[in-house]
Image (cartoon, grey):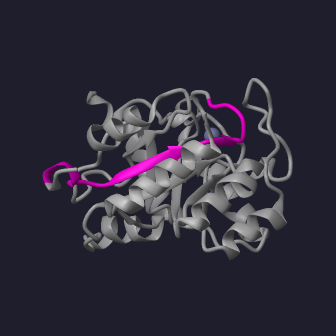
Amino acid sequence: MFRFARRGLRVLMYHKVSVTGGDELTVTVAQLEQQMAWLRAEGWAFVSVADVARAAAERAALPAWPILVTFDDAYLDTLELALPVLQRQGVRAAVFVPTAFVGAASAWDRVPRPLMHAAQLHALAGAGWELALHSHRHLNYSTLTTEQIAADVRENFSALRGLGLNPAPALAYPFGRRPRGAAARDAMRRLFHEAGVQVAFRIGNRVNALPLRDRFEINRLGVRGDRSFGAFQRKLRWGRLL
Ligand SMILES: [Zn+2]
């Protein structure tokens, strides 16, 4: 890949991992292995949520060709299937945890899937992965008042701390949805500042320009298991333009 095409911060968004078959929100183990091996071979620099938060808050520089790997929802298959693949490649990721569902199932999915319980989240943290916010109850923030978002963020933080986990100061919006309207968004940003949320991730399917323009609107590239490896490579390079 040409150097000019590597400008900016890329954040990959994964959800489920499966041995057998991929779909829009599920990649196979083989696809994940191929993608991580290729990123390593191409020389991308894997960064953490903490690195991105520092870059946003202090204008700290990220390494050249930065990429962050994220998994939403804390599915059990993140631990059982994704962790071994990423460990083989020397990659750590961040997981966004809807804490009301720890040890339960993903009630928001058409077919609910098992989610990690506390000891399993600790196993991920012990492997150097970051755990961050994904709304306590996996709520759609575009339907909530500022006060409801504030209460939900507080619960999400305190539930992670209550489990003995040290949350990274980041949130991924469930369903990628944020409040509409400038006033509601400004109110949400203020409560993020007060609560200690330093960066927030949407979907967007775009590469983020650096320095980051908006720390609460960081775009992620959704990785789909029903697309070819070539499509992954193009999306990584260009975002959704191709
Ligand atoms: Zn989610």
**Depth order, front residue of 118/35:** 35
Q: Position of residue 68 (x, y in %)?
A: 43, 58
Q: In this view, does 152 lie above or below 211?
A: above
Say whether residue 3 is magenta: no
Identify the residue at image location x=26%, y=38%. 238
Q: In this view, does 130 lie above or below 142?
A: below
Q: Where is residue 193 in the image (x, y as percent from the top left)?
A: 44, 61
**Depth order, front residue of 121/232:** 232
Q: Position of residue 59 (x, y in %)?
A: 25, 70
Magenta range is: 4-22
Q: Quadrant of ligand 1?
A: top right
In the picture, measured across the screen, residue 156 lies left or right of residue 149, that is right
Identify the residue at image location x=59%, y=66%. 88
How many labels, in total?
0
**Depth order, front residue of 236/132:** 236
Residue lying farthest to the left in this orientation: 4
Q: Is residue 47 above or below residue 185?
A: below
Q: Is residue 163 above or below residue 73?
A: below
Q: Where is residue 50 in the image (x, y as percent from the top left)?
A: 46, 70
Please indicate, yes or no, whether residue 143 appears anywhere in the rendered image.
yes
In the picture, measured across the screen, residue 95 lies left or right of residue 213, that is right
Identify the residue at image location x=42%, y=30%. 180
Please indicate, yes or no, whether residue 147 appears anywhere in the rendered image.
no
Tell me the quadrant of the picture where the C terminus can be found: top left
Identify the residue at image location x=79%, y=26%. 111
Say whether residue 21 is magenta: yes
In the picture, measured across the screen, residue 225 lies left or right of residue 219, that is right
